[in-house]
Amino acid sequence: MKEIFDSLKNALDQGENTVLATVTFSSGATPRGAGARMLVGAEGRRAGTVGGGAVEFRSIQYSQEVLQKMQSRTHNFHLSKNDIEDIGMICGGDATIHFLHLDASDLSLRALVDAAVEVISEHSVAWLVTDLSEADTLGLALYLPAAKNGDLDEDLFYGFLEDEDLREDLSIDTAQLMQSAEKIEAGDREFFVEELVTPGFVYIFGGGHVGQALVPALAAVGFAPIVLDDREEFVNPDLFPGAYAVCLCDLGDIAATVTITDRDYVCVMTRGHANDLEVQAQALKTPARYIGVIGSKKKTKIVRDRLLERGFTEEDLDRITAPIGLNIGGKSPAEIAVSITAQLIQIRSADYKQGN
């Protein structure tokens, strides 16, 4: 989403109208699933993708038609060999893409985009709502729930949801808006809702070679990595391109630096057994979604035995993934980073499917 909204902000600064193409439904072996987005301007694709190939080529054409007519629309792609609209793809399946016209002169759009850029930068909790009707008004909204953002006293709305009367007319329950790439119905209209920012942080304890390789890999697929180390020479943002933050941390008291929630991931890769033991013991007392630890089977057993001696149960220790990452046979820091990133993607995808 960052690329999309950074590009959209740039387009607004230039006074350029754009079209936001969003995959709202897919089935079968379609190139991209629901929630894939692409921003298109007069010169073609500006950011994002809806899958590449013929679908994307045709989507850019449709987007430019929408730009000319200044009218949003929805199109169904039938990706089957014998369908009426065979667009030359080998894979079968169906995809529905909504093409939302965005008018650069719309001040409410500017306010929404500015808010979205800030939300992404601050890693706040917000949902993007797209009106799937073909109305000629702004069909985009942003919802920030106070219950999910501790610095807010009340829910915030941008775009078409700013209108309280409209929210009442549509009988929109804010709980409906907190979905992951889903269609919802309210009143006589249909909306597509999606969380704007990938939920949770990835806390990486240890800024060594693996941590340095892991940060850009995670950032490239939408995670927000935070590096924590007790060595000043490793608390250097230049070593971690794409990191949300790099922090000097007492590994014996991590709660003094960070608060780990049930949406967060913990990756333990400190410089020694003793630090690994301390960080794991503290992480197990948090609701972390994932705790992964780097190391050999021998090291894993030593630390596990010491945690049992401290009173943790086998059930507690089953929360720990060790060795960390998928078993792809990699040995180098870059390969280990790929295996960890793949495992976190796997977990995140499973959570989305379950609606978490």
Image: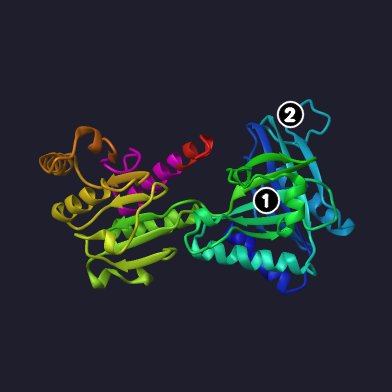
N-terminal of the pair, mark 2 or mark 1, is 2
* Marks 2/1: CA–CA distance: 30 Å
Q: Which residue is disc 2 drawn over?
A: 80
Give the x, y percent position of residue 21.
Answer: 72, 51
Compared with residue 184, is residue 41 higher up or lower down, i.e. above or below?
below
Report the residue at 79% width, 33% height from top.
86
Tell me if residue 147 is in the magenta stretch. no
Q: Amino acid at mark 2?
A: Ser
- Range drawn in magenta: 321-347
Q: Residues within 10 Å of mark 2 (few under 14, many from 20)?
A: some
Q: Amino acid at mark 1?
A: Val
Q: Is residue 319 visible?
A: yes
Give the x, y percent position of residue 139.
Answer: 76, 54
Q: Which residue is disc 1 drawn over?
A: 129
Give the x, y percent position of residue 295.
Answer: 21, 46
- In the picture as drawn, the residue positioned furthest to the top comes out as 82
Compared with residue 172, is residue 238 higher up or lower down, i.e. above or below?
below
